[in-house]
Image: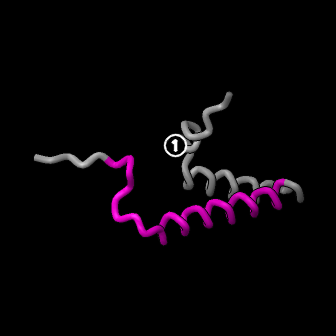
Amino acid sequence: MVDWESYWSVIGVSGLLVIGTLFFLFPEPLTSVLGIILVLVASGIWLAGWYRDDDEPEDRAVVEA
């Protein structure tokens, strides 16, 4: 089974934006549409994370001196 969480932590939203932009610039109609979809999805994920009410993410470790 594929562990999508580990792939997502490697690629992230910025990687999705870059891949979508490259697909959009590739001169084929199908890849351009796929690129637009990827950019819109990545932008939506980025905005959703930006508007989230969490002050501190759960996976961020708090280091005390």
The amino acid marked with disc number 1 is: Ser
Q: Is residue 26 left or right of residue 7?
A: right
Q: Position of residue 15 (x, y in %)?
A: 58, 50
The chief SS type of the magenta part is helix
Decide: is 45 above or below 22. Answer: below
**Picture residue at 75% right of the left edge, 53% below the top:** 23
Q: Determine the residue located farthest toward the bottom in the rendered image.
A: 51
**Picture residue at 89% right of the left edge, 59% below the top:** 29
- The span picked out in magenta is 31-60
Q: Is residue 15 left or right of residue 27?
A: left
> What SS does tag 1 mark?
helix
**Picture residue at 75% right of the left edge, 63% below the top:** 36
Q: Nearer the viewer, residue 31 or 5?
A: 5
Task: From the image, tell me which residue sits under label 1.
Answer: 9
Inspect the magenta stretch and tell me whether residue 41 lies in it.
yes
The quarter holding residue 43 reads bottom right
Q: Position of residue 60 (x, y in %)?
A: 34, 49
Q: Position of residue 35 (x, y in %)?
A: 75, 58
Colour scheme shown: one colour
Decide: is 62 above or below 1. Answer: below
